[in-house]
Image: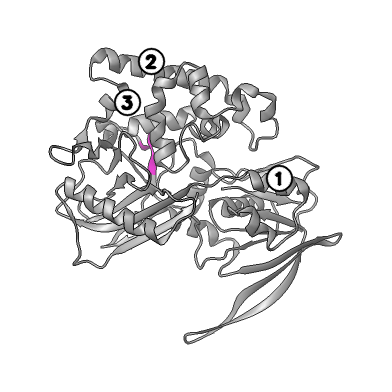
Amino acid sequence: MSSHIWPGMGYCRPYPTASVQRLEGDPVRKSDRNARILILGAGPGGLSAAHYLRRYGYKNVTVFEKLGRVGGLCRSVTEDNQAFDLGAAVISPAYREILKMARRTGARLEKVYGAEAFSMANEAGGEPYHRLLDYLAGRSSWRDYLRYLLLCLRYLWTRFLLREHFRRPGWAEIHLHPELCVTFAEWLQKNRLQELTRLFEIPITTFGYGNLDEIPAPYALRYISPLSLVAFLLSATRFARFLPGVLLLRRFRYGFQRFWEKVAWDLNVRLNIRVKSIKRTDQGITVTYTHPMQVIGDQVAHADDTTLFDYLIVACPLLKEDLEQVMDLSEEEAWLQSRAEFIPYAVASFEIADLVLKERVAFHLPLPPLGEPMIISQPHPDNELMAFYARLPSAEPTPDDERQLREHIERYVKAFGGRINTDDDWHSYDAWLY
């Protein structure tokens, strides 16, 4: 997800923090507390930016969201009185700003622990599960476990030495460090940490951030901070349930989206907004948009409106061609948008009968072909609802992707001895460019 702020082409690190990086003059001056600020997108980036702008005294902050809900890629549902996340699901101790917002809003967190590995290579017969630690370490001897642990410690130390590069949001000076301007796979190779590839494929590739030879090293290094890696490693162990939650990955008890709803309660968020045009003039930024005006029974009346703002923050993932339909881009902005890359990712959920996962999450390792689930999640062992996460094979999501993903899910659960519960009408499918 990307965020941009006009004028001045500053950048906003949307998640987990929302501070503004100065590039061409200070985009939002301290003396300008009454500035009219528009944020496009009520996902984590937009809402966190609005939250902190409001806390720092900016009074006229408006958030436009095209959907009828807030949360972006955080989507929560309730099935049989239990909350499920069908999108972003966990946070680490490194998400300090998110944790602060959770305390302010009273959102409750609970520990995430336990993970299994499985492979469909044995689907013709035998147990699909295999030991996660054996896979990560490469073998099953204590010597290999020790070597794996030492490699993890070396990464933690190497990443700690780089901490100054990631204290501030944005990437304004990253080009001054060419050793970091490579893919994460290259960075691991140069630092003799390539044997940790299997480990990093889990929080990066399976979570939808691309292959290690696709994702830039600075993105991965900021994401996999020492705190996050330690939390990930500890949460995957069987004894994690006995550890304090501050050391582990955690999830919101009532869902990640419900947390963002709490954040949005104190903000001026307008839903179901369709932006038609954005024009920049000497007076400010003029936005023309369509919005719901009146609801009478099943009828919804819409109205066109035009409002002048002083600043615009784009906190949603827009393709260059989409952005050009509503506004004129400068040469620099057009270049920036053309460089953005997106990954087609999907999550499907079904009620699965006759199956309870050994742990609450299972990873397909080695990684499966594109289009097949990489993660199976069952947050509640007494609930049949499971979520399946996959990277799609097409450049953009297509109807065939959903059909093929369901076929793979049917094959997967059959290998585990389960089946899709066709007597229950629960099913969801969401695909997006990540």
User: Residue 73 got which mark?
Assistant: none
Amino acid marked by disc 1: Trp
Amino acid marked by disc 3: Leu
Q: Which residue is mark 1?
A: 335
Q: Which residue is mark 2?
A: 150
> Residue 15 is drawn in which quadrant?
top right
- How far, Cα to Cα, is label 1 from label 3? 39 Å
- With respect to residue 296, does 198 lie above or below? above
The residue located at (47%, 41%) in the rendering is: 209
Q: Which dot, 1 or 3, sits closer to the camera?
A: 1
Query: Could you tell which of marks 2 and 1 lies nearer the N-terminus?
Result: 2
User: Residue 136 got which mark?
Assistant: 3
Q: Secondary structure at mark 3?
A: helix
Left or right of 6 on screen, residue 117 = left
Q: Which dot, 3 or 2, sits closer to the camera?
A: 3
- How far, Cα to Cα, is label 3 from label 2? 13 Å
Amino acid marked by disc 2: Leu
Q: Which region of the structure is painted magenta?
A: 245-250
- How far, Cα to Cα, is label 2 from label 1? 42 Å
> Residue 233 is drawn in which quadrant?
top left
Q: Residue lying at the far right in this picture: please name it.
A: 282
